[in-house]
Image (cartoon, rainbow, N blue to C red):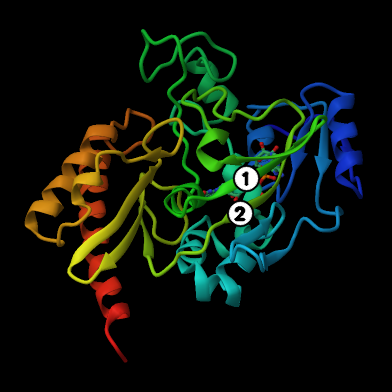
Amino acid sequence: MTSMPRFRLHRPTSTADALAALADAPGSRPLAGGTALLVNIRYGLEAPPALVDLSAIPGLDGITVDEDTGALVLGASVTLARLAADPLVLDGWPVLARAAACVAGPTHREAATVAGNLCQDTRCVFVNQSEWWRAANGFCMKAGGETCHVVPKSDRCHAAYAGDLAPALLVLGASVEVLDGHGSRRHPLLDLFRADGRAHLALAPGALVTAVIVPPMHGAVAGYAKVRVRESIDFPLAGVAGLVRRDGDRMADVRIALTGVASAPVPVPGLDGLIGQPWAELAAANVSEAVGKVCIPLRTTAASPRYRRAVAMGSAVRLLGDLWSEAGSEESPV
Ligand SMILES: Cc1cc2nc3c(=O)[nH]c(=O)nc-3n(C[C@H](O)[C@H](O)[C@H](O)COP(=O)(O)OP(=O)(O)OC[C@H]3O[C@@H](n4cnc5c(N)ncnc54)[C@H](O)[C@@H]3O)c2cc1C
């Protein structure tokens, strides 16, 4: 790790002032909990001229339910510790509490925020290293070099997105509020991402995520399964979120999304054939096949791509089987 470089620190008390501060010096970055950004700066991976601390802006830390739509509205600055323990979340969207509780360690979660988790940088075994380690390898496309060491002939960086909240939010059909100089707009969460490890966010420079909106679950059940080297604290080698809605003995809705295996979170297509079917061996095989088709991890972690693909396929099948049973027990009369 290097020592902290010089930068200006702004602490605005309104989103308008935050946007102005971000526009003032190109390359300036929003600072939320700092648990991802400050580490990158210490590794010499980024050197923004200014950081714009969002923590003094009122109104960004709410957890509320929209009375008209029943949707959960999470402010950008809600900490993961709060998300994991909030009664509204635990009652209506428990998968979000579960995913939040899987992030890093307890002290990180006290500071880490929802927007910071979504917007965190991509990761790679050739990138998240000290500067001298990266220099010894001739650097790489993501920071200071020209080649992607994961896929040397590629013209793009293949660093992997490893946020734990995104797949859970994707299966729930969440959207994000984005604020920039032209005003505030709502986008499907998936539109926030693009498959480029060097520029994986589709946010305009200086734009802010201000909130995440999560529709009600309408009787569906959802879960998140994370595979990591150290259970106590680690990024996902592969993370699988799933959602199941049952109509008696038939599947009425089924969704899966992945993290840790590509430069952006991956929704799994090809599950429509399961609708109207019971959960059985055939459905399990279809789930495994559908995940295997889009889960193509590369050499971005110390664990092998083959292992991560196999474990994602297996985790998806097990998770959906569990959700099927859980949805069945929630349907039965008490
Ligand atoms: C040891 C360790 C283990 C970790 N393990 C995990 C893990 O298991 N899973 C996981 O998902 N993460 C993990 N992380 C990464 C990080 O702690 C979390 O992702 C955390 O949620 C980041 O949130 P933050 O508020 O600290 O973001 P910050 O570090 O403040 O910001 C992260 C990025 O988001 C941008 N940003 C922040 N807020 C906004 C906003 N409102 N609008 C636009 N951009 C914004 C920042 O500019 C920056 O680029 C780990 C980190 C460490 C150091």
Say which amino acid is labelled 2: Ile
Instruction: Report the side of 205 relative to 260 (left or right).
Output: right
Q: Is residue 29 above or below residue 277?
A: above
**SS category of the residue bearing label 1:** strand
Looking at the image, is mark 2 or mark 1 earlier in the sequence?
Answer: 1
**In the rendered image, which residue does mark 1 sit on?**
176
- Residue 177 visible to the viewer: yes
Identify whether 317 is placed above or below 2.
below
Labels 2 & 1 near each other (Cβ < 8 A): yes
Q: Position of residue 275 (x, y in %)?
A: 22, 53
Give the camera-side residue of 109 and 76: 76
Screen quadrant of the C terminus: bottom left
Label 1: few (<14), some (14–19) or many (≥20) C-alpha neighbours in 10 Å: many
The answer to whether residue 307 of the structure is visible from this angle is no
Please state the horizontal and vertical placement of residue 35, each as a whole percent of the image: 65, 48
Find residue 52 and report its image quarter.
top right
As drawn, the label of residue 213 is 2
Q: Which mark is residue 47?
A: none
CA distance for labels 2 and 1 = 6 Å
Residue occupying the point 57% across, 23% down: 199
